[in-house]
Amino acid sequence: MNNFLLAVRSSFGFLSTIPVGITMEGLDEFFKRTYLHILVGIVLGLIIGAVAFGLQSFLSPQLSAVFIIVFVYYMTGLNHLDGIADMGDGLTAHGSREKKLKALKDMSLGIGGVAFTALALLAFYTAIISLLTGEFLLPEGVSTAVIIFLSLFVAEVSAMQCMLTIAAFGKSIHEGLGSILVKSTTLPKYLTGFAMGIVACTLAFWYIGLPLVGPIAFVASIASAMVLINISNRHFGGVNGDIIGASNEVGRTIALVAIFLALKYGFGGV
């Protein structure tokens, strides 16, 4: 199989639950092209957005939000949410950096992990509800269903860029898949992913006459990844796979919040 196509297939196997199969050779090819995170984000965003569009059409906002979240994790798996839990345990552990690192790597779940996971899910749910029920001044003919479709598309692309941001600018604290991603994500690969992501997010809302909404969400999510790098450096001395996964969850929700604010306060147009 062509090495690029093998990398594409492996990127979906690594970053989603789509049953495409994955091998060590495929992972090696994928890590040579880490910008493929954005391609996966684009495809997942289109699928998740389309499902959300349909759900919003015949369910209440509350039920739609619940089923959207269920479908997001059905498509992406729970590894990134597990990263939030591990990060929460590490950040809330008392004592030295060594104790915090031990809590971060511990397989058991503590109260910090439970609290961080609950807050992350609550924020995700609330962001979706806000977009489904918000009163926005939208261009003629643009429905709430269209907004939720575009929002989830942009959020998924932004979440993938967050992981690339952690990998590109973070420092590994131990060996593992996270450290391989960090070593592999050079600045040219990061900028390639950034270019793909910013174009995709801009075109999404440009289509309905709100060209700045997508870039605002994209940049806001990247900023959240930079904050996570700073927090992780202070508490752990660097980043690992858990922090990379956590940035995906945080970045997705931050993107949705940024879209809500841009629509609510009229920052979406030129």
Image (spheres, rainbow, N blue to C red):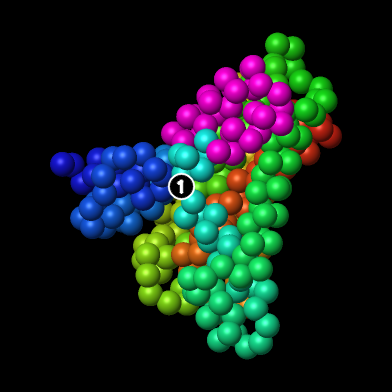
Residue 113 horizontal side relative to residue 190, left or right: right
Where the N terminus falls, by quadrant? top left
* Residue at x-position 67% and y-position 74%: 92
Task: Please say if 244 is above or below 101.
Answer: above
**What amino acid is at disc 1?**
Gly
* Residue at x-position 55% and y-position 86%: 98
Residue found at the far top of this picture: 141
Q: Is residue 208 magenta?
A: no
Q: Dot 1, how many residues are within 10 Å of its Cα: few (below 14), some (14-19), or many (20+)? A: some
Name the one closer to the observer, 165 or 228.
228
Query: Bounds of the magenta span?
Result: 41-70
Identify the residue under disc 1. 77
Residue 80 horizontal side relative to residue 111, left or right: left
Q: Is residue 63 magenta?
A: yes
Q: x and y percent of residue 132 in the render?
A: 72, 28
Q: x and y percent of residue 103 in the render?
A: 56, 77
Task: Please say if 138 is above or below 100.
Answer: above
Name the one closer to the observer, 240 or 83.
83
Q: x and y percent of residue 111 in the render?
A: 66, 68
Viewer can see residue 16: yes
Name the one closer to the observer, 199 or 149.
149
Predominant SS along the magenta part: helix
Tell me the quarter of the picture where residue 94 sits.
Answer: bottom right
Q: x and y percent of residue 80 in the render?
A: 51, 55
Where the C terminus falls, by quadrant? top right
Task: Please say if 47 is above or below 244.
Answer: above
* Residue at x-position 65% and y-position 28%: 64
Residue 9 horizontal side relative to residue 92, left or right: left
Name the one closer to the observer, 265 or 192.
265
| Secondary structure state at the residue bearing disc 1 | loop
Task: Please say if 10 is above or below 226.
Answer: above
Viewer can see residue 204: no
